[in-house]
Image (cartoon, helix red, strand yellow):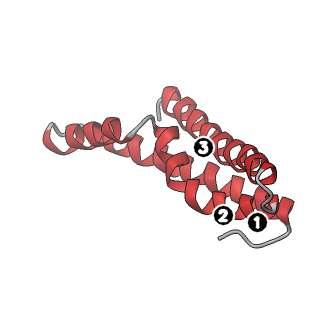
Amino acid sequence: MEERVIISMMHCYFIALGVMIGGCFIGSIGAFATGEPPLTAIKRISSGIRIWAIIAAIGGTFDAITNFEKGIYQGATFDVIKQILIIIAAMGGVKTALLIIGWFIQEDVS
């Protein structure tokens, strides 16, 4: 595999991780300011922000769709495999963030 694929996977992993952790913890500050319990807000926000963390990590859905289209219609199977690996890496970043958030709030976040 090409080294650039590994680098792209690492970037997507950590971007998804950062979006999840940052979004949940910074969002809980807003909940605290409005009088809501912040740990409950973290759990609620983490449920709603997952797909957006993956989309932000892969750079939007149009690039992914374009790469899939190129792989299917032009026979560039490497592009399809690369895009699938990048999506899996972003999902791994989200799952890691959910694990860290679960440890922090002492609840199961699923």
Q: Which is in the foreground here, disc 3 or disc 1? A: 1
Q: Which is in the foreground here, disc 2 or disc 3? A: 2
Quadrant of the snapshot with the C terminus: bottom right
Image coordinates for residue 8, horizontal then vertical, percent: 52, 32
Between disc 3 and disc 1, whose residue precedes?
3
Image coordinates for residue 25, horizontal then vertical, percent: 76, 48
Q: Which residue is mark 1?
A: 40
Look at 55% across and 46% down and name the residue there: 53
Q: Which residue is mark 2?
A: 44
Helix, strand or loop for disc 3: helix
69 vs 50, left or right, is left
Q: Of the numbered discs in the image, which one, if any, rests on residue 24?
A: none
Helix, strand or loop for disc 2: helix
Looking at the rendered structure, the kind of residue marked 1 is: Thr
Which residue is nearer to you in this view: 63 or 30? 30
Between disc 2 and disc 3, whose residue precedes?
3
Looking at the rendered structure, the kind of residue marked 2 is: Arg
Calculate the distance from the C-alpha at mark 2 to the C-alpha at mark 3: 17 Å
CB under 8 Å between discs 3 and 1: no
Calculate the distance from the C-alpha at mark 3 to the C-alpha at mark 1: 21 Å
Q: Which residue is mark 3?
A: 16
Calculate the distance from the C-alpha at mark 1 to the C-alpha at mark 2: 6 Å
51 vs 34, left or right, is left
Look at 51% across and 48% down and name the residue there: 52
Label 2 crowd (10 A; few <14 / some 14-19 / many >=20): some
Looking at the rendered structure, the kind of residue marked 3 is: Ala
